[in-house]
Image (spheres, grey):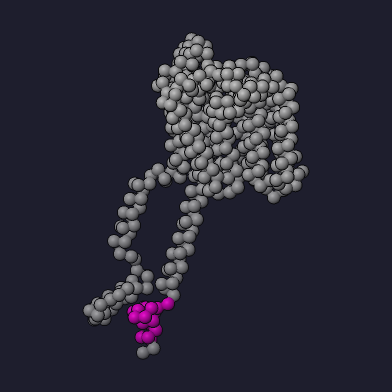
């Protein structure tokens, strides 16, 4: 603090109370002037007004992507299901109405999981896995046949294989986090992992649901890799997966037929399966810019299950190549934000959970879209957040809520670390100001008392 000569003379010629007040300000004992806290208060108010969304401590780009996908999904479900719903349920809006109800439930689930600490899964992961196994067994006993497969319960409304995909990621995140120091031992790493995936995959493949089985096993291997599993064990797991897959394809009539149709379609697109040929027809009619929302023809002339498995073909016909590419871009953005949340997660469990859930959603979207353009053998995967169906929508919304919670926990930890850092800096600065008297500094009250007593 610099003072003019006039200020020095004024202080020296003032009363003892003035000098005491002056020296207390210099030593830091007096309160700061009222103007300083008012400036801080104005800065806080300004930052609060400009960053109210940021105070939610959620990933805003991810939220915007999810909202866009949900709104677009409702539009496409209404368009794709109108004729299909009329022919099956005698009500043109039956499927759309059910989708809105499922979405409302999914939003409630996502909000709840956004504000519930994801570390609670450490307590309930085993119970979730047990409940999933029980539901998969119930599917076999109920024996509800839908589209040639036994996959659902409760009137075709609940599909436990969708739950099994998310539970696989959750349970393995908890398990791998707890066993991270023992993963390189085959008895603690590969063998228990194979047992877990074998039970889930075996119950799903009996239904049969080949695509869900592949997804569960793939997610298990990917999670093991992300957790830092031994590369030799991962290579052995891949070999076993390929062998088991080959056996399943040879034994299963559905699997062998799909592989045969896929290979024939690669050689000649006109020899692809009926489903893929009708999807090609939809994309050709859509062209670059599409025929317009609600104006697709293939959904009314034999395109199989347009509101669910084939909804991407309806998107291609009504919005064209540009609309389809925009949808692909949204899923890429969702994956990017999920992996960003994983990278910033407070611990390895959060990192595994965020990476696994975001990769699962992206994989489901990739399979659904790739099948429609004959890049992969046919699989019955739903298009996340777009396709009609309650099980997939609710489970996906639960995954989104978990991602949001991991993002919140990351921001809270960053905020706490920042407060601790500033507290240490302020403490050191305060000590530094009080520790040594600077040159030209007025003597403190203690030194004056000492000097007066000596005199």
Q: Which residue is found at the position 41% from the left and 72% from the top?
A: 433
Q: Is residue 439 visible?
A: yes
Is 384 contained in the magenta span? no
Q: Nearer the viewer, residue 266 or 232?
A: 266
| In-front residue for pair 360/187 | 360
Residue 312 image position (x, y, % from top left): 50, 25
Q: Relative to residue 32, is residue 194 drawn left or right?
A: right
Residue at the extreme right of the image, as rendered: 187
Magenta part of the chain: 436-453
The front one of 243 and 416 is: 243
The residue sitting at 47% across, 35% down in the picture is 329
Q: Is residue 412 left or right of residue 27?
A: right
From the top left corner, tell me how far across and down residue 261 is, in percent: 64, 21
Q: Is residue 238 above or below residue 295?
A: below
When asked about the image quadrant of residue 61, the answer is: top left
Placement of the N terminus among the 4 image quadrants: bottom left
Q: Residue at x 67, y 20 (%)?
A: 257
* Residue located at (42% from left, 18% from top): 295
Q: Residue furthest front?
A: 267
* Residue nearest the observer in this picture, 438 or 144: 144
Residue 181: percent from left, percent from top:
69, 50
* Image location (x, y in percent) of residue 56: 43, 43
């Amino acid at each position: 603090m610099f003072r003019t000569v006039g200020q020095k003379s004024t202080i020296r010629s003032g009363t003892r109370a003035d000098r005491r007040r002056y020296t207390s300000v210099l030593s830091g004992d007096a309160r700061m002037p009222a103007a300083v806290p008012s400036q801080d208060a104005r800065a806080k108010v300004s930052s609060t007004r400009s960053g109210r969304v940021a105070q939610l401590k959620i990933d805003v780009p991810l939220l915007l992507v999810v909202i866009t996908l949900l709104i677009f999904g409702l539009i496409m479900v209404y368009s794709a299901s109108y004729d299909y719903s009329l022919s099956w349920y005698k009500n043109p809006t039956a499927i759309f109405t059910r989708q809105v109800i499922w979405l409302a439930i999914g939003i409630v689930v996502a909000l709840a999981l956004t504000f519930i600490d994801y570390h609670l899964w450490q307590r309930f992961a085993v119970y979730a896995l047990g409940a999933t196994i029980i539901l998969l067994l119930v599917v076999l006993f109920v024996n509800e046949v839908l589209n040639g497969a036994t996959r659902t319960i409760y009137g075709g409304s609940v599909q436990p294989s969708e739950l099994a995909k998310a539970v696989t990621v959750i349970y393995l995140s908890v398990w791998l986090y707890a066993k991270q120091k023992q993963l390189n031992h085959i008895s603690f790493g590969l063998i228990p992992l194979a047992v877990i995936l074998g039970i889930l995959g075996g119950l799903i493949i009996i239904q049969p649901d080949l695509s869900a089985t592949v997804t569960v096993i793939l997610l298990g291997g990917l999670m093991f890799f992300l957790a830092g599993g031994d590369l030799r064990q991962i290579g052995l797991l891949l070999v076993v997966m390929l062998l088991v897959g080959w056996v399943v394809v040879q034994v299963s009539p559905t699997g062998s037929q799909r592989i045969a149709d896929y290979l024939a379609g690669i050689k000649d697109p006109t020899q692809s399966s009926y489903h893929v040929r009708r999807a090609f027809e939809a994309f050709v009619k859509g062209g670059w810019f599409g025929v317009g929302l609600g104006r697709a023809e293939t959904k009314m002339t034999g395109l199989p299950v347009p509101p669910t498995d084939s909804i991407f073909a309806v998107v291609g016909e009504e919005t064209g190549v540009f609309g389809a590419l925009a949808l692909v871009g949204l899923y890429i953005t969702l994956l990017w934000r999920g992996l960003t949340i994983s990278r910033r997660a407070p611990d390895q469990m959060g990192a595994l959970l965020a990476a696994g859930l975001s990769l699962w959603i992206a994989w489901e979207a990739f399979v659904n879209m790739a099948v429609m353009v004959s890049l992969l053998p046919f699989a019955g995967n739903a298009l996340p957040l777009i396709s009609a169906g309650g099980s997939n929508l609710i489970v996906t919304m639960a995954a989104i809520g978990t991602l949001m919670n991991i993002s919140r926990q990351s921001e809270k930890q960053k905020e706490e670390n920042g407060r601790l850092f500033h507290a240490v800096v302020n403490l050191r600065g305060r000590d530094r100001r009080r520790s040594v008297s600077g040159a030209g500094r007025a003597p403190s009250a203690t030194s004056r008392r000492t000097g007066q007593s000596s005199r």
